[in-house]
Image (cartoon, helix red, strand yellow):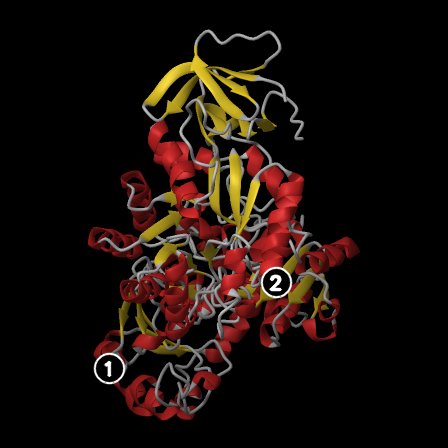
Amino acid sequence: MRHLLSMEGVERAVIEGLLDDGDEFLEVLDRPIPKVPTLRGKTVATMFFEPSTRTRLSFEKAAKSLSADTMSFSPGTSSLSKGESLKDTVLTIQAMGVDLMVVRHAATGAPWRVADWVDVPVVNGGDGAHQHPTQALLDALTIRQRFTTLDGVRVGIVGDIRHSRVARSNVWAFAALGAEVTLVAPPTLLPLDATTWPAATTSDLDDVLTELDAVYLLRVQKERGGASVFPSLAEYTARFGMTVERFNRLKPDAVVLHPGPMNRGVEISARVADDPRALVLDQVRNGVAVRMAVLYQLLGGERDE
Amino acid sequence: MNDLILEGGLVLTPDGPVTADVFVRDGIVAGLGESLGSDEATVLDCRGAWVGPGFVDVHTHLREPGEEWKEDIGSGSEAAAAGGYTAVLAMPNTDPPIDAGHLARYVADRGSEVGLVTVIPAGCVTAGRAGERLSHLDELWMAGVRVFTDDGDSVADAGLLRRAMDYLAQLGGIVAQHAIDAGLARGGHMHEGDVSSRLGMAAIPAEAESTVVARDLALVRLTGCRYHIQHVSASQTVALIAAAKAEGLPVTAEVTPHHLAFDHRVVESTDPVFKMMPPLRSPEDREALVVALRDGVIDMVATDHAPHADHEKDVPFEHAPHGVIGLEWAGAVVNTQVGLEPVAFYERLSIAPAALLGASGQGRWIEPGAPATMTVFDPEADALDHARSRSRNTPHLGRGLRGRARHTLLQGTLTHSATIVPHPS
């Protein structure tokens, strides 16, 4: 693996290898001194051309837990505001001496362009509505911890699928690991043509609710609410929200996931969010561990050292 | 002017192809035969090649005036001659746009000064391409403009388009429509289909094209104005064209080399070289375009040669400008992807586009008395392996295309030769 750009087409064994490493790094994070010297002397640059705090912090924590140095780039204070091109920006940062770049960008495919331009491994930290592969890894790890495998696990991904890079990453990872995925959304938030996605689609959450082992709720972008994609936030919540009433109808061992940040009271009720079967904070913790696994594998760490 | 002998090629005459030498004197085809040897003539080896009328492109962006860092009339003329073109229709979406007579004359005069290819200006339908009021249609007509287009944008206002058609119908002018509905296309970067769905990219449905064409055809029926559909991309548009032609409407259509060569699956790479308007569509659409060009439902190939500088294209897909260059490879793409026999090949690349433009001295089958405005095309040669345009945004390199212009002649002057250094007068 030279870069980690997409979950589409990644083989099951590769994903499982990353999840296995993630499990091992979780153990490191539980130590009194949660740090190993594996990547000492390496520098990881987080290049976030789109505002984000949690993903960047998670990558930086992962790098530091492996003893790598970190550099961070954010667009507000940068040369981009002076008209510098993306290409010149990443070549400049590379020339300072970095060993890996994590790139988040609002434009689909931007991390692929960066990977063409630079000589170091690139991790896609989220591009447009396209891919966010480390999110898929942390979600897969979270579900695997609960059910020991994803084989045959029924996952419903609920919400704004059309504009979601989380959904576009997770369907491929979950399906590669053997899960049965159903996408649930109002017609205006389903993909326009999902014929080649490894998933079923429906606009009726209640029809599939009781069959699901894991319900993955996507964040409703409130700024879209009431625009033209669905009539109102209240109507969305009534038809697609994880209310207490719906939560109580789930299978007894079914779990709820959310990539955050949550809109309590919109796609998830506050009481569900605080229930032990809502794995939101497990996801966050697993995020650090799988990002450690990704950095470790891309920077040439040996699995069995 | 030196006499020329075009030796041993398959010559496309009004009576069909014959293998013969072509004798050129004073810019005119002086004779056809096998024994026209002349000691002082320059001999052009045409063995294994087709000798036909010069290619005519009805869709070229020469970028002058205003965007000369991408291309100018000199560099664009060189690219055209290298591709086998003897005439190009310069699109009017320059800066300033060609919406008045003096601007059209400037473009034509610059083309004459360069002298490599006949540069015919197209004019805007609306002032400043703003879509609000008519441009100086009469003034443009007097300056020699025959094709009117706001290319780069559709004329969206049906009332305004109807007035333009009413006005141009009495002159005999042609409205050429860049048929893309701005509302359906809004924010889109590629074809709407399974690829855009997986990429999460905002996309443009085929209906953005077909709905505009369907509306416009009703206006053609109303006004009788000649109507040309630019860069057809979708099979549903092909069906509309076939029906309009069956009805006898004065309609013609063009297809680009890139829409013949590629479909939207190449956009999976998110390589901005594949970003163009209209976008590359489905494999079924591409196949429908190939068949339509073969059958003549689509009359001609037009390059939509759209130069952009490296720094403009070397950005994420969504940030890149639309367009690719194509003058250098149009013949090779048609030869490789469509596989027309020589008569149909020259009909699509020369005869039909010359007829659309009413360009004198262009698009004439080879016979004594015809202007020596010719393209010698070698269908077996490797395609040109580098851009001659000022810009390099082409998807056609390294694709194993076959065919290239061996010699290009404009009124007896060699404007391009793969074997002889050209020396335009």
User: Where is residue B333 shown, x and y percent of the image?
Assistant: 44, 36
Pick the residue in front: A279 or A28: A279
Image coordinates for residue B186, horizontal then vertical, percent: 45, 70
Q: Give me the residue at 37% from left, 36% from top.
A: B347
Q: At label 2, which amino acid type do we have?
A: Val
Using the image, tell me which numbered label, if any, was put on residue B186: none
Amino acid type assigned to the residue bearing label 1 in the image = Asp
Residue toward you, B130 or A252 = B130
Q: Which residue is mark 2?
A: A103
Both marks 1 and 2 on one chain? yes
Mark 1 Cα shell of 10 Å, populated few (<14), some (14-19), many (≥20): few
Assign a secondary structure to mark 1: helix
For the residue pair B329 and A288, the one nearer the viewer reads as B329
> Where does label 1 land, which residue?
A206
Q: In this rendered view, identify the residue nearer to me: B275 or B136.
A: B136
Q: Is residue A9 above or below residue A190?
A: above
Residue drawn at x 70%, y 54% as measured from the top left = A99
Marks 1, 2: nearer the viewer: 2
